[in-house]
Image (spheres, coloured by chain):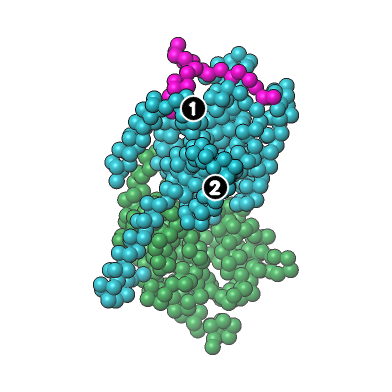
Amino acid sequence: MKKLGLLAGLLGLAACIFVPTLLKSHGIYLFTYWLIYVIATMGLNLTIGYAGQKSLGHAAFFGIGAYTVAVMMQAGYSFWLGMPLAALGCFVVGLALGFPALRVQTIYLAFATLGFNTAVWLVMRNEEWLTGGTFGINNIARPEAFGVSFDGNLSYYYLVLAFAVVLGLLLWGLLSSPWGKAFTALRDNPIRAESLGVDIRGYTLLSFAIGAAYAGIAGGLFGSLVQFIDPAPFTVEASIMMYLMVVVGGPGYFLGPLVGAAVGVILPEWLRFAQAWYLFVFGAAVVMLMIWLPDGLLSIPDRIRAKRQSREASAARAANGTSGVKA
Amino acid sequence: MTNSSIQPVLKVTDLKKAYGAIQAVGGVSFEVRPGEIFGVIGPNGSGKTTLFNSMLGQITPDTGKIELNGQDVTQLGPLELNRLGVGRTFQTLQVFGKMTVRDNLIVAAQEHQGSMFSRMFAPGDSNLGAKADALIDQFHIKHVADKKAGELSYGQQKLVDIAMAFMSEPDLVLLDEPCAGVNPSLVGGISTLLKDLNKTRKGSFVVIEHNMDFVMDLCHRIMVMVEGKVMAIGTPAEIRANKQVLDAYLGD
């Protein structure tokens, strides 16, 4: 099973490397866009899916990251200096946003983070001296490293892919360490977790901070991709969309963001034929998904397995003719 | 009666807690000795749960003192108490439903090893796997060890729940109605398990339970609480013979 997963992962990576070479520039752009959202929602999946903290402020971190890198580059600093600063800045702000989560949970936490998102958005829109206000920041350059320019669409795509792979591996490492179980314990039952010595304060704060750092890096990559940023992509609506991506993919499934971000980024492109009906179709699809697959698309294999097991169990009971199952 | 040369694992002195005008616990004192299974019984509203929550750091008592192995822990919260060696189970089922039984047990002890940051770089499963497997064997839940805890029957989940409290080898385990909702055939099993654990692990237990046969059979000493006060403390035989207790609680 593990080997199968590794094989699938390598095949997927190979596809990510070769498929874009066959695409035109718009296709490459979409793939890049998708990967950037994969990075952002990987972080959100940690916050929501693993640690169970309902955050509706993720786009704010995405924006903080984008503006940090853009402002730094405008001031003449390198992309490679802006990027760690974006990650660090978001980590710190994310840590701060974690504090409300120590007091409130579920929908109340969602509203607290939503308020945070609105506040950040207002700063982006109103503080023109820093952010350019509604006019935004233009001509954000793409980076280069060791004499290699990532200016071309395909080369920039590969840079983003490299970021996604490294960040994915880091997250995988984190979740395979005892931290993964601690986050899951925090999500499933915080009171029980605390009674077993799990520092729920620390893990709550860090789930926000690490998730935010991922969004910050994604934001930095986003700015360089579109080369122009204004406050529009960082609204509460964008946060809701990111939340939706996590839920659609499967919260708490490691590969959920790959699927969720694809639904959020690529599906709208495919639905273009529907034109004015696009949002209707998309909305209806989400409603149906929530009814039939509340744990997301990646829960399908688990569901099939659970069904098969219960069928086998009932067949075994029928064969025994008794209900002699001990507690 | 008390042997003063041995330091008690738990010592509660004149504990009081009021909710508004209601004195839930009104001056309770007792000791739990090393290796002892100590039962707490009493009718509904007698203050058992408030007492329990105080001992677990879920609430802070108004006055009084709680000492664990001689250390004042009155003001500490659940996390610190657990780190100092207090395990617990809950009245209702509290397992991590989406984790396997084995992972439930591992997470129940992993936070006692190293610091948070050293654990970040630690392999997922050091010696805890073997420890978990030992408890899994002892609790006869090997056949479900790799299943998600949420998919098990109520009785199986109850066993997982109890096993989790023992993973970190606590000095003191507080069991809140371990038989609540469990079918009668399993009650005997839980009793046997707890006796075994008490023998092999040298820990002390405090048990709240309404099932009198279970308490009388399991506990070395029993405390009867009525209206926030201690009515009697003694061996099961003494409690059974206590006229006052019979009138107030046990009598028909």
* Chain identity of mark 2: A
The tint chain A carries is: cyan
Callout 2, which amino acid? Val
Q: Is residue B180 above or below residue A294?
A: below
Between residues A69 and A30, which one lies in front from this camera angle?
A30
Q: Which chain is green?
A: B
The residue depicted at 59 percent of the width and 57 percent of the height is B58
Residue A139 falls inside the magenta stretch? yes
Residue A38 % position (x, y):
48, 36
Residue annotated with mark 1: A26
Q: Are marks 1 and 2 in contact (CB under 8 Å)?
A: no
Between residues A31 and B236, which one lies in front from this camera angle?
A31
Residue A97 falls inside the magenta stretch? no
Residue B22 % position (x, y):
70, 69
Secondary structure beneath disc 1?
helix
Give the CA distance from mark 1 to mark 2. Answer: 23 Å
* Crowd around label 1: few <14 · some 14–19 · many ≥20 (10 Å): few
Mark identifier at residue A281: 2
Secondary structure beneath disc 2?
helix
The residue depicted at 58 percent of the width and 77 percent of the height is B43
Q: Is residue B105 above or below residue B156?
A: above
Residue range in magenta is A135-161
Based on the displayed image, in which of its 4 quarters is residue B193 positioned? bottom left
The residue depicted at 66 percent of the width and 31 percent of the height is A231
* Crowd around label 2: few <14 · some 14–19 · many ≥20 (10 Å): some
Residue B45 % position (x, y):
62, 73
Q: Are marks 1 and 2 in one subunit? A: yes
* Chain identity of mark 1: A
Using the rendered image of the protein, determine whether residue B30 is visible from the camera's viewpoint: yes
Using the rendered image of the protein, determine whether residue A53 is visible from the camera's viewpoint: no
Based on the displayed image, in which of its 4 quarters is residue A84 positioned? top right
